[in-house]
Image: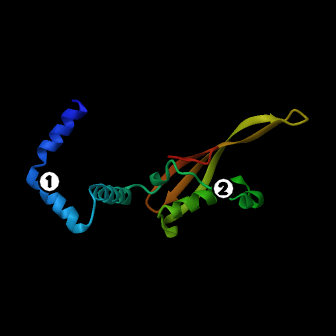
Amino acid sequence: MTNTKKAALVQARVTPTLKERFAKALEYEGLTESGFVNQKITEFVQEVESKMNPIEMIAGKQIVIDYDIEELQGIRAAVQDAVHTLLLENGVDDDDIFRIKVENEYHVQVGEDALGKAITEPEAFEVLVELTDHKQNIIVDKDQIVRV
C-alpha cells in the first residue's frame, strides 16, 4: 500500500466534525497541532520508558570516564563509576543499584615498546549491572558508548 493510500485511509477515518472539534479543543487549550503531537509523543515515551528495564534505557548513551579515578583506582573502577553515574542520570535510584562490575576487558594491540613487548589499549569492557529487579551484562565500547 502506498503512502498516499495510507494517508487517504487515515484522513477518511477523521470526520469533518471531529476535525472541527479537534481544532476547537486545540484553540481552547492554546496548543498548535504540532505542539499537541509533541506532547502526546512525550507522554507515550515516558509511559513506555517507565515500563522498560532501566538497563536498556542507557543503551546507545555515552559514559564519561573520570580520569582521576582511572589514575588512582584503575580503568575498571573508572568504567564502573561512569556506568553508575549514567544509571543515576537516567532515573535509577541509587538504592536500586546492587552491583556494577567490569567482568572482562578486551584489548587491541596498538604498538610495541623498545623491547618488542605489545602495547595494548582497551577496546571494550563487559560490565555486569545488577539492580534490585534486573541483572544484565552490557558492553562499553572504545568510544565509551553503552551497548545492551
Residue 8 on image: x %, y %: 16, 38
Is 116 placed above or below 18 here?
above
SS under mark 2: loop
Label 1 to label 2: alpha-carbon separation:
52 Å
Q: Which residue is mark 2?
A: 65
Q: Residue at x 22, y 62 (%)?
A: 26
Q: Quadrant of residue 36?
A: bottom left
Q: Quadrant of residue 39?
A: bottom left
Residue 74 on image: x %, y %: 73, 55
Q: Count up the numbered dots.
A: 2
Residue 14 on image: x %, y %: 13, 48
Q: Amino acid at mark 1?
A: Lys
Quadrant occupied by the N terminus: top left
Q: Which residue is mark 1?
A: 19
Q: Amino acid at mark 2?
A: Ile
SS under mark 1: helix
Which of the two marks, 1 or 2, is nearer to us in this view? 1
Q: Is residue 20 left or right of residue 37?
A: left
Mark 1 packing: few (<14 Cα in 10 Å), some, or many (20+)?
A: few
